[in-house]
């Protein structure tokens, strides 16, 4: 299979257990740090997900962390694996997962925002403790790409940091992870069904290869289509790409554009 190893795995530069798990734990920690600043009014405020308040987002985080345990328990034959094995279009998968998320949130026992964040953090940290001995085992497959347990940890890592951004925005603040490059590596390792797009263009073509060729210490790539930044020209900002591809900011905009903060 082109772009994969003999087992169907896609090699992803920068995604290895040491830095990956550090970024994963950073995501859990920053969610807790942001959440502790919430007042009762903040928990009742809208989140960037139009149908959810910040308190709903806390409940969603708890559900997702528990889902990751279930998927790992049942891998490679989990309900997620069965869904991904259909090879459905990303929009179809997104609708099915959105319905699942809504149903799980509705079934969640009544709890406060802080209680749900505490339950999320405990579940997410326990999940990380399970990963190292089985990092390279298969988790699920999407079309021709096999996602390993470690790759799925990349999807979780990206999810935690993106939801940290959601929580910060619910308070009218911004959030940017310390190392967006590692998060993009995790996204590429764990979410082959979600291609990353730059503003008005397809996947950030060649980003991972350019980063690997540039070597360590060369800095972060500049904005798409420019030579700005100290990385390969035109490679794009990984964090902005994830925010766009997850629907959090419009194509062609930057997170700090006027009007994006409430």
Image (cartoon, rainbow, N blue to C red):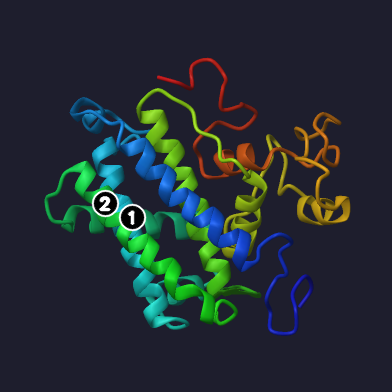
Q: Spot the residue most to the left.
A: 110
Labelled pair 2, 1 in contact (Cβ < 8 Å)? yes
Residue 227 is left or right of residue 249, and the answer is right
Residue 141 spot, x, y in % from top left: 56, 75
Q: Is residue 100 visible?
A: no
Instruction: Bin the neighbour count of mark 2 within 10 Å (Cα to Cα): few under 14, some 14-19, many 20 and up.
Output: some
Against 252, residue 160 (above or below) is below
Residue 219 spot, x, y in % from top left: 78, 41
Comparing 171 with 216, the one in front is 216
Against 249, residue 24 (above or below) is below
Residue at 26%, 51% (x, y): give it.
118
Q: Spot the residue most to the top.
A: 258
Question: Can you say which quadrant of the picture contains the C terminus?
Answer: top left
Residue 111 spot, x, y in % from top left: 14, 48
Q: Is residue 198 visible?
A: yes
Which disc number belongs to residue 118?
Answer: 2
Residue at 57%, 19% (x, y): give it.
257
Residue at 58%, 55% (x, y): give it.
194
Residue under numbered circle 1: 121
Comparing 112 with 218, the one in front is 218
Comparing 10 with 86, the one in front is 10
Question: Can you say which quadrant of the picture contains the N terminus?
Answer: bottom right
């Amino acid at each position: 299979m082109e772009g994969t190893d003999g087992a169907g795995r896609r090699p992803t530069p920068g995604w290895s257990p040491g830095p990956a798990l550090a970024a994963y734990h950073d995501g859990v920690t920053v969610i807790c740090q942001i959440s502790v600043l919430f007042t009762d009014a903040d928990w009742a405020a809208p989140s960037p997900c139009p149908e959810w308040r910040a308190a709903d987002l806390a409940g969603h985080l708890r559900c997702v962390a528990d889902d990751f345990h279930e998927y790992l328990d049942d891998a490679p034959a989990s309900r997620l694996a069965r869904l991904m094995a259909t090879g459905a279009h990303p929009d179809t998968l997104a609708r099915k997962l959105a319905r699942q998320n809504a149903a799980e949130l509705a079934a969640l026992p009544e709890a406060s925002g802080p209680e749900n964040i505490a339950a999320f953090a405990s579940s997410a940290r326990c999940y990380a403790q399970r990963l190292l001995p089985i990092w390279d085992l298969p988790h699920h497959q999407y079309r021709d790409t096999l996602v390993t347990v470690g790759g799925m940890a990349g999807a979780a890592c990206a999810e935690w940091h993106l939801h940290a951004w959601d929580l910060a925005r619910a308070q009218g603040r911004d959030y940017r992870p310390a190392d967006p490059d590692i998060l993009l590596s995790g996204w590429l390792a764990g979410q082959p069904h979600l291609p990353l797009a730059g503003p008005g263009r397809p996947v950030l073509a060649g980003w991972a290869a350019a980063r690997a060729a540039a070597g360590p210490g060369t800095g972060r790539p500049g904005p798409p289509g420019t030579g700005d930044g100290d990385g390969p020209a035109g490679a794009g900002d990984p964090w902005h790409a994830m925010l766009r591809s997850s629907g959090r900011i419009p194509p062609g905009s930057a997170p700090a554009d006027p009007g994006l903060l409430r």
